[in-house]
Amino acid sequence: MPVLNERGYLRRAVETVLSQEVDGPAELILALGPSTDGTNEVARELAAEDDRIVLVDNPAADIPVGLNIAIRAGRYPTVVRVDAHSELRDGYTRQALATLSRVRAGNVGGVMRADGRTPFQRAVARAYNSPVGLGGGAYHGGTQEGEAESAYLGVMRRAVLEEVGLFDESIRRGEDWELNLRIRRAGYRVWFDPSLSVTYWPRESWARLARQFHATGRWRGELVRRFGRGNSLRFFAPPALVVAIGLSIVVGLLQLTGLLTGWWSVAASVVHLPVLAYIALVVVWAIGPGGGKGWRDKLWTAAVLPTMHLMWGAGFLAGVARGAHDTVDTSRLGDRNTPLP
């Protein structure tokens, strides 16, 4: 478990891990980043309470670095990745181990069940769980068991990890997708089991959500530069939306200033259709059951969806054009990366 500034979530996350029932010995390795909110003090308290908890330092704070440090410190043949901002459901580990053995996979993952403690966080959770928000990936609400492109968190065979080379420490976001790409290319299955469920707590503020999605989109653009067709077509929908909005704005300004008139103006108006269709989709989704129960929920949903899509899409375009370089997600801690997906 990579950990960075998770004082409000760490204890509960650790409790759900330690309560898992498995046939055999287990340990929980916390890779501690340079937290500034007292998280590491909580971690030391937890380690003093249970000798199954092992603490290792991750001064770089980067996700893949912390994961690799923790994996190398581990003693057992199966690695269960967990996050400090999530909670494992009862029976998660036992079921995952059974599925790993049954289908002879290299990595097994389940469903990310986003949840929230505030109206805004619940709106983000609804977006995570809906096909309109982060639709496409099996772990965002899939119901059919089978081979998958990637896995949320993941329960992995150590031998497979060591064969493919652990996590790529040059990738700060999307490192799980890239690892699963190597696992699949090495001839192993990445498997989705919808009976596995993990509660995930998303960002708590609009600004943090925007920064998170821009950084994630930027790194997806970097992964497109590196792996090209290895990326799913669904990753290109948000940047296509950003381009469509840009074209619509340009054409609209030309029409308003009279620089574009007559039949040329009528023909050019077709660029407005995708934007109008997107606005209609967001409005219909927000006022429907997917938008929540009250008007406040629905307004937050209508604000959250475009924020996620546009920030991710803008980051993607920047990543494709210029690469990600040292881009980090500053939504959790100043100028350092965050260990959250």
Image (tube, rainbow, N blue to C red):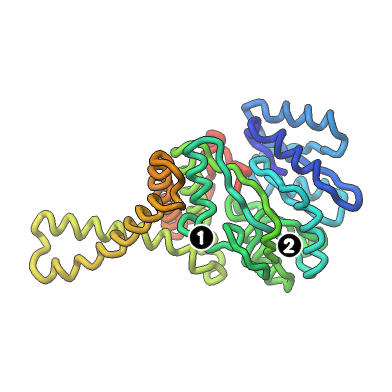
Do the residues under discs 1 and 2 have CB atoms within 8 angstroms? no
> Which image quarter: residue 257?
bottom left
Label 2 environment density (alpha carbons within 10 Å; few <14, some 14–19, many ≥20): many
* Relative height, residue 300 to residue 165 (above, below): above
Task: Please name whichever residue, 79 or 301, is drawn nearer the observer in this view of the structure.
Answer: 301
Rendered-image quadrant of the N terminus: top right
**Residue 269 at x, y percent in the picture:** 20, 65
Q: Which mark is residue 107?
A: 2
Please indicate whether residue 303 sits to the left or right of residue 263 in the image. right
> Which image quarter: residue 321?
bottom left
Please indicate whether residue 49 sits to the left or right of residue 114 in the image. right
Task: Please name whichever residue, 250 or 81, is drawn nearer the observer in this view of the structure.
Answer: 81
| Residue plotted at (13% across, 59% down) | 255
Please indicate whether residue 143 sits to the left or right of residue 319 in the image. right
Q: Is residue 330 visible?
A: no
Badge 1 or badge 2: first in the primary sequence = 2
What kind of residue is marked 1?
A: Gly
| Residue plotted at (53% across, 43% down) | 329
Q: Residue furthest bottom?
A: 187
What kind of residue is marked 2?
A: Asn
**Residue 288 at x, y percent in the picture:** 41, 53
Q: Which mark is residue 244?
A: none
| Residue plotted at (28% across, 59% down) | 276
> Which image quarter: residue 30?
top right
Q: Secondary structure at mark 2?
A: strand
| Residue plotted at (29% across, 57% down) | 246
Q: Is residue 192 visible?
A: yes
